[in-house]
Amino acid sequence: MIVRNEQQLKSIKEAAQVAATVLDRMVQLVAPGMNTYDLDQAGKRFIEELGAESACYKYQVGSRVYPAFTCLSVNDEVVHGIGSLDRVLQSGDIISVDVCTRYNGYIGDNCRTVAVGEISPEKQKLLDVTEEAMYEGIRAARKGFRVGKISSAVQKRVEKEGYGVIRDFVGHGVGRSLHEEPQVPNFGKPGQGPKLKEGTVLCIEPMVNMGSYKIKMSDDGWTALSSDQSPSAHFEHTVLIGANGPKILSVPEGKEAPVLV
């Protein structure tokens, strides 16, 4: 678990603000009739306008190289969806917009799932519960607690509604690299995992299926889908373990951080 000094924290906060500003601009463009390639290209433009670069573009896992600038996952796509001219958003869809940027050598990472036009009450509840689960996890991100305290808080909120919390992808530490230690699962027990230390920065990111927690991979080698084709939601913030509790860093320019009650 890496503890950041004051200068590093300042840089991570700036990177997280850039990522949050890009995300905020992108979700405002989401509308029926838009294709996900154009949305991804808008993200690319916003990132460049803010003097940053995409941290997911050309991200490599083995021989696979991620080809897009943001991750855009629609309906039953859980994470890492790739923008496409052929994927045209329809009213009633939901889309997870995941933006990770590199700014002055540091990473900012955040995600939000939003409605396309009018959505069903069932889908809206999925979005609400997933976002609430993220905030439950953030409230548990305090120095002296173990990572499992976050994991347990998320899992309890999700499974209370009968939803499935994803096991295959987890939250993580963040700094100069996109994925650093510690891993932050969205399931577990309060006493599990390493102790959280003041000055550590984490990405807390529940991924939740309306049905089973199980996933399958698409033919593109990147996009994860719910195994039962149920809708999936994903919310994420970059969070500092502060002296007096957690502090959300991924806040758009000109906006206030959410109040953690």
Image (cartoon, rainbow, N blue to C red):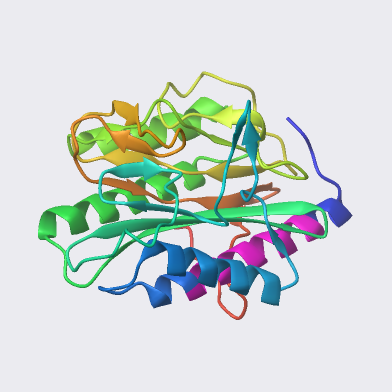
x and y percentages locating residue 230 in the rendered image: 19, 40
Compared across the picture, whether 232 is left or right of 98 comes to left
In front of the other: 24 or 74 = 74
Q: Is residue 106 above or below residue 193?
A: below
Name the quarter where the C terminus is drawn: bottom left
Q: Is residue 177 magenta?
A: no
Residue 17 is a magenta residue: yes
Secondary structure of the magenta portion, mostly? Answer: helix
Residue range corresponding to the magenta coloring: 10-25
| Residue at the bottom extreme of this rendering | 254
Tell which residue pokes out farthest to the front in this image.
Answer: 86
Q: Nearer the viewer, residue 140 or 17?
A: 17
Could you tell me which quadrant the N terminus lies in? Answer: top right
Residue depicted at 28% across the width and 29% down the height: 213
Q: Position of residue 250 (x, y in %)?
A: 59, 61
Q: Is 166 above or below relative to 122?
A: above
For image coordinates 56% across by 77% down, the residue present is 255
